[in-house]
């Protein structure tokens, strides 16, 4: 099953065919932990956790490879709220090649990165989610660009 050119998250069965739970490495006894409630197919797996995994797989299949910096699914106590945040790292300034944050080559790569992030945001909106994009441009203080997409997995308020 291929997710190319699709603009909806895969079904649970499609996800099971294509990928494994991102938490599996913690649940295989490698760290002597108890069985993980996020293990693929577990009935205790929260619906928002599943949707977040679907979003991750869809983004990676449609727009990858990407450098993921952080993924956060907000909780209030033990209950997930549906607010999900993903941060991506963009291009780095190649200081060894003499690039600066104002170099045309770097700015072109940065513009391409932010255009891709904008397409991801629009895909999420087309899937019925609420999403916004926050851009962090590289400068003399930080040698790389970053983008964070805030979303509500059910389309509620951000």
Image (spheres, rainbow, N blue to C red):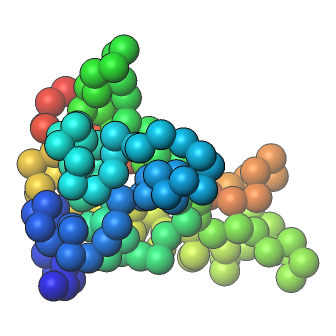
Tell me residue 102's x, y (percent).
72, 65
Which residue occupies the extreme top position in the image?
77
- Image quadrant where residue 57 sits: bottom left
Query: Does residue 147 appear left or right of residue 89 in this picture?
Result: left
Query: Does residue 101 appear left or right of residue 119 in this picture?
Result: right
Query: Does residue 122 appear left or right of residue 149 in this picture?
Result: left
Q: How many marks?
A: 0
Q: Is residue 62 above or below residue 158?
A: below
Q: Residue at x 21, y 76 (%)?
A: 17
- Please identify the quadrant where the C terminus is shown: top left
Whether residue 117 is visible: yes
Tell me residue 46's x, y (percent).
23, 37
Q: Is residue 156 above or below residue 39?
A: above
Q: Is residue 71 above or below residue 118?
A: above
- Please identify the quadrant where the N terminus is shown: bottom left
Q: Residue at x 86, y 72 (%)?
A: 95
Tell me residue 81's x, y (percent).
26, 25
Tell me residue 126's x, y (percent).
11, 57
Whether residue 132 is visible: no
Q: Which of 88/132 is in front?
A: 88
Query: Does residue 8 appear left or right of residue 57 in this picture?
Result: left
Q: Which of 27/21 is in front?
A: 27
Q: Residue at x 54, y 53 (%)?
A: 29
Q: Residue at x 80, y 67 (%)?
A: 100
């Amino acid at each position: 099953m291929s997710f190319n050119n699709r603009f909806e998250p895969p079904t649970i069965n499609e996800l099971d065919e294509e990928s494994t739970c991102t938490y599996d490495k913690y649940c295989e006894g490698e760290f002597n932990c108890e069985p993980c409630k996020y293990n693929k197919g577990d009935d205790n797996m929260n619906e928002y956790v599943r949707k977040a995994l679907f979003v991750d797989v869809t983004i990676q299949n449609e727009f990858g490879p990407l450098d993921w910096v952080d993924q956060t699914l907000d909780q209030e106590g033990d209950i997930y709220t549906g607010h999900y945040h993903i941060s991506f790292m963009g291009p780095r300034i190649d200081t060894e090649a003499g690039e600066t944050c104002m170099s045309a080559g770097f700015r072109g790569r940065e513009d391409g990165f932010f255009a891709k992030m904008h397409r991801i945001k629009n895909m999420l909106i087309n899937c019925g989610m609420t999403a916004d994009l926050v851009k962090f441009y590289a400068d003399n203080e930080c040698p790389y660009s970053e983008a964070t997409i805030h979303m509500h997995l059910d389309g509620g308020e951000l």
